[in-house]
Image (cartoon, rainbow, N blue to C red):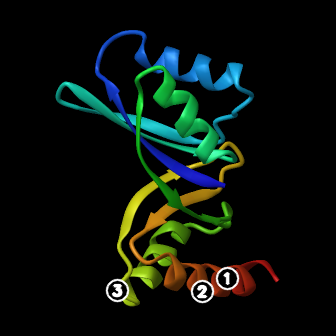
């Protein structure tokens, strides 16, 4: 899975066009969100086929700015403070979270500024909390 960063025109119908276009090309959005920023909106979505998504969106005039590696982390919903503790561990290793959202399976999705280091922390977290 990858995160695609998209710039959308901030006007009615743009998000619908994007979703409809991806759907016609069998590209499923597995999580994400859209945030207004003046005359544009910045969107981040989790997809399996990022390069294909980039191509089909470009064909209709929608810009995919970047394709990002993601950390997909399952947190224990029955343990309060999991998000804070996981993010604290990243921060303690000087890793910044550039983007954060959830997928459709209630998993934490992050785009870190240092994917390799974040991946190691995520693996250790999973071993500690899920094994």
Query: Can you give x and y, in whole percent of width and height, for residue 108 in the image?
Result: 58, 59
Residue under the image location 51 percent in, 67 percent down:
83
Numbered label attached to residue 13: none
Classify mark 3: helix, strand or loop: loop
Residue 90 in the image: state x and y as whole percent.
44, 81
Q: Secondary structure at mark 2?
A: helix
Locate residue 38, reporting x and y percent.
17, 29
Which residue sits at x=70%, y=79%? 126
Instruction: Point out the tag, 3 or 1, that comes first from the N-terminus.
Output: 3
Residue denoted by label 2: 120
CB under 8 Å between callouts 3 and 1?
no
Q: Which residue is mark 3?
A: 94
Compute the Cα span from label 3 to label 1: 17 Å
Toward the top, the furthest residue is 12
Q: Residues within 10 Å of mark 2 (few under 14, many from 20)?
A: few
Please give the residue where the numbered disc 1 appears in the rendered image: 123
Is residue 65 shown above or below 40?
A: below
């Amino acid at each position: 899975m990858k995160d695609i960063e998209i710039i959308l025109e901030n006007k009615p119908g743009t998000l619908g066009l994007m979703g409809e276009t991806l759907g016609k090309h069998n590209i499923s959005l597995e999580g994400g969100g859209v945030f207004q920023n003046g005359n544009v909106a910045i969107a981040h979505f989790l997809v399996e086929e990022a390069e294909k998504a980039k191509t089909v969106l470009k064909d209709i005039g929608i810009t995919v700015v970047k394709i990002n590696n993601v950390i997909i982390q399952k947190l224990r919903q029955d343990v309060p403070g999991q998000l804070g503790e996981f993010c604290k561990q990243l921060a303690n290793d000087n890793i910044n979270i550039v983007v954060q959202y959830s997928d459709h399976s209630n998993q934490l999705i992050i785009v870190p500024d240092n994917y390799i280091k974040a991946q190691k922390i995520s693996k250790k977290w999973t071993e500690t909390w899920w094994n």
